[in-house]
Image: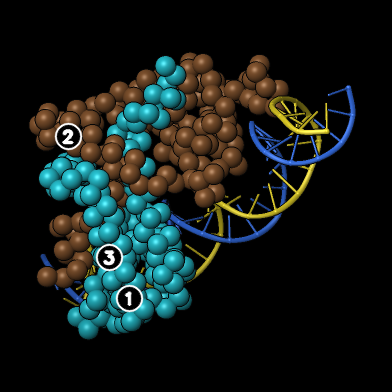
Chain colours: A brown, B cyan, C blue, D yellow
Amino acid sequence: MKRSTRKERDPDLGILAVQLSARVQREIFTRAAERGFGDVRPRHGAVLAYLDPEGTRPGELARLAGRNKQTMGAILDELERLGYVRRAPDPADRRAKLIIPTDRGREFMAVSDGLVETIEQTLADTLGPDLYRDFRAALGRSVASLPATGPDGDA
Amino acid sequence: MKRSTRKERDPDLGILAVQLSARVQREIFTRAAERGFGDVRPRHGAVLAYLDPEGTRPGELARLAGRNKQTMGAILDELERLGYVRRAPDPADRRAKLIIPTDRGREFMAVSDGLVETIEQTLADTLGPDLYRDFRAALGRSVASLPATGPDGDA
DNA sequence: CTGTGATCGTCCAATGATTGGACTAAAAGA
DNA sequence: TCTTTTAGTCCAATCATTGGACGATCACAG
């Protein structure tokens, strides 16, 4: 049996991880596009997956998403231009800013949270509720057991 | 409880998928770098994860890795320059080529397969053998139940 | 208070990675 | 043979991330 065939039929953990990520992302953003959010790309998920309705600092978003500050800044520029977030001064610290979702931003967050929910439901249907619950828990524990990935050595 | 905190403590499937992928990739390539393969980057995994010792066609690699032909071509240029693969004519089809790993390429493949194995073993230790087996199977089934991701609409 | 060092966000230029479109050579099929 | 499809590559354009540096502000030790 050829290695390539074996890896295709019975993929190792590295391959499965990449594929799960790619497929889930694709599902989310193509469905979101169907619902009128065609201008949001996977890249923007780094912000919208974590953003607080009351606002979050850029640095905190960068940390959560595992991107460095420059990258986060660029993503935020884009989201601001597209009308999903705005930058407000942070009352607690005059160096800092608060990234606050606009109405449209909150709308997207609600929709994408729902889409993820739907995907999870699909998997629950595929695996059965018990198996899915275990899978979900094991996935969480697996991620937690692997060293976190930061852009700059994870600082 | 803030949304960002909630998403950090109890990440949804989208976040978990991205993190699993990023962490597994990082683990593989930093460990590989420690073993003298510092010039191989995650990007190259698209080839080396699937490549047959006897050789594989570029188009087939592109399909397996979910990249388009141009991207695959660029990755192959790089791997060839770095001395991990070579391009040979395919005896069966004079249009086609065979990408064949060099000795060093095969060395990397052995090492990275081992590293993945080690990560899987780590998870097995964390979760326990039974739970891990179930997790691994559920992961495979989950990936299979989501539409495949191709670069050009998956053609 | 005042000085010192850390932190917050941003700017810029450089690199990396992916894409779309087009093209040649060869194969496959009517 | 003629036509259509396939395999790989070339090119230019776009998208994404990085490294280094900067002014402003804060925290804290003296």
In this view of the protein, which residue sits in the foreground, A41 or A72? A72
State the image coordinates of residue A148 (x, y, percent, origin top left).
42, 44
Label 1 – label 3 distance at C-alpha: 11 Å
Provide the residue designation for mark 3.
B114
The chain under label 3 reads B
Q: Secondary structure at mark 2?
A: helix
The amino acid pointed to by label 1 is Glu
Chain to which mark 1 belongs: B
The answer to whether one can see residue B110 in this image is yes
The residue where tag 1 is placed is B107
Q: Residue at x 34, y 28 (%)?
A: B10
Q: Is residue B151 left or right of residue A107?
A: left
SS for tag 1?
helix
Q: Is residue B102 above or below residue C11?
A: below
Front of the two marks 2 and 1: 2
Q: Nearer the viewer, residue B71 or A57?
A: A57
- Judge whether C11 appears above or below B70 on screen: above
Q: Chain of mark 2?
A: A
Give the alpha-carbon distance from disc 2 to disc 1, as whole Å. 37 Å
Q: Residue at image x 51%, y 37%? A: A63
Task: Identify the amino acid type marked 3.
Answer: Gly
Q: Is residue C13 left or right of residue B140?
A: right
Q: Which image quadrant is residue B41 in? A: bottom left
Q: Which residue is mark 2?
A: A134
Q: CA distance from mark 3 to mark 2?
A: 27 Å
Mark 2 residue type: Asp
Disc 1 with disc 3 on a shared chain = yes
Residue B107, compared with residue A31, is above or below; it is below
